Amino acid sequence: MANHRLNQGIEPKPGGTPSARSAPAEVFAYGLADFCLRMGIGRTLAYRCIKENLLHSVKVAGKRRLIPATECTAFLARLAEKGGAK
């Protein structure tokens, strides 16, 4: 008898069982450290850009700062308009 999971289009994990969670999740926001790593900038420059309104962020629970994933391209466009961050 054929395995029904194979007919559902779910690929098995190597050395494991098939899982619906094996597909990568869509990223909606980055923590500041992840955003800095992705953009190749340091935290100090990121905070300066937030202060100068070049980078938009959201504070969560009064402390944690998240940057929407859409800000990656918007941030680069604002930097290009301004002539770069100094």
Image (cartoon, rainbow, N blue to C red):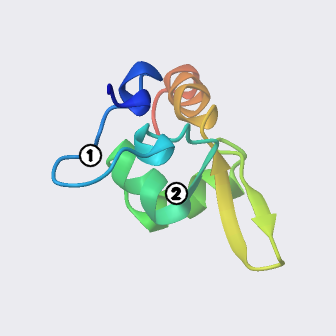
Q: Quadrant of residue 75?
A: top right
Amino acid type, residue under disc 1 in the picture: Lys
Q: How would you rate the neighbour count of disc 2 (Cα within 10 Å): few for under 14, some for 14-19, many for 20 or more?
A: many
Q: Secondary structure at mark 1?
A: loop
Q: Would you place residue 37 above or below residue 38 in this image?
A: below
Q: Quadrant of residue 78?
A: top right
Q: How would you rate the neighbour count of disc 1 (Cα within 10 Å): few for under 14, some for 14-19, many for 20 or more?
A: few
Amino acid type, residue under disc 2 in the picture: Ala
Residue in front for this viewpoint, 42 or 63: 63
Residue in front for this viewpoint, 9 or 51: 9
Residue 13: mark:
1
Please report whichever mark, 2 or 1, sits nearer to the chain's N-terminal start: 1
Report the residue at 38% width, 61% height from top: 42
Left or right: 70 as drawn, with respect to 85: right
Which residue is denoted by mark 2 in the rendering?
46
Residue 4 in percent (x, y) is at 43, 29
Residue 77 in percent (x, y) is at 55, 22
Residue in front for this viewpoint, 17 or 1: 1
Front: mark 2 or 1: 1
Report the residue at 47% width, 67% height from top: 44
Using the rendered image of the protein, determine whether residue 38 is visible from the camera's viewpoint: yes
Rendered-image quadrant of the N terminus: top left
Residue 70: mark:
none
Q: Secondary structure at mark 2?
A: helix
In this view, which residue lies farthest toward the right?
62
Left or right: 39 as drawn, with respect to 55: left
Using the rendered image of the protein, determine whether residue 86 is visible from the camera's viewpoint: no
Report the residue at 68% width, 66% height from top: 65
Q: Quadrant of residue 3?
A: top left
